[in-house]
Image: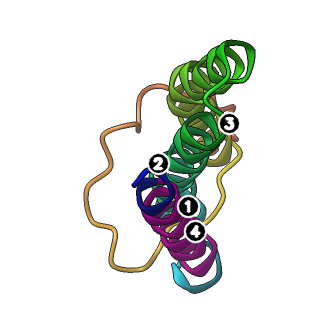
Amino acid sequence: MTQYFVAFFMLAGGVFCFVAALGMLRLPDTIIRMHAATKAGALGSGLMFLALALFYMDLSTTLRAFAAILFILFTAPVAAHLIGRAAYCTRVRLWHRTWMDELAYTCDWTEPEQDD
């Protein structure tokens, strides 16, 4: 019975990782791409680590798998935030349909002064 759960979690993790990779290829700008990579990638790898823990059913392997899941869940949002902020502050072009700019006052840009 356990092998069915392992197969389900491994296949579901693979599908989510594939969706993350497809999102990296198909989405239009950096901000949207990093969202797809971190959300679907973290879920996919978490499901694969869960399948690993169920397959081996060993205390050492299970603890390592859960530690890896926690590490991914804690670091993926922080990494996504930093990548998105760095992309925005270095003025990476946004998608042409992006109309809301809530970060306009967060970066220290040096604008050239205009002489009138």
Q: Dot 2 corresponds to which residue?
A: 43
Q: Amino acid at mark 1?
A: Met
Determine the residue positioned at 64% across, 14% down. 63
Question: Disc 2 or disc 4, which is closer to the eye?
Answer: 4
Work out how far the residue at label 2 is from the one at label 4, CA to CA, in angstroms: 10 Å
Question: Disc 1 on helix, strand or loop?
Answer: helix
The answer to the question of whether label 3 and label 1 lie on touching residues, with beta carbons closer than 8 A, is no
Residue 44 is situated, as x and y percent measured from the top left of the image, at: 53, 55
Name the N-terminal-most of marks 3 and 1.
Answer: 1
Q: Amino acid at mark 2?
A: Leu
Residue 102 is situated, as x and y percent measured from the top left of the image, at: 30, 40
Q: Amino acid at mark 3?
A: Tyr
Magenta-drawn stretch contains 18: yes
Question: Disc 2 on helix, strand or loop?
Answer: helix
Name the N-terminal-most of marks 1 and 2.
Answer: 1
**Residue 19 versus residue 100: which sits nearer the camera?**
19
Q: How busy is the neighbourhood of tag 4: few (under 14 within 10 Å), some, or many (20 plus)?
A: some
Question: Disc 3 on helix, strand or loop?
Answer: helix
Determine the residue positioned at 53% across, 79% down. 28
Question: Disc 3 or disc 1, which is closer to the eye?
Answer: 3
Q: Which residues are drawn in magenta?
A: 6-23
The answer to the question of whether label 3 and label 2 lie on touching residues, with beta carbons closer than 8 A, is no
Name the N-terminal-most of marks 2 and 4.
Answer: 4
Q: Amino acid at mark 4?
A: Gly
Residue 48 circle label: none
Question: Disc 3 or disc 2, which is closer to the eye?
Answer: 3
Work out how far the residue at label 1 is from the one at label 2, CA to CA, in angstroms: 11 Å
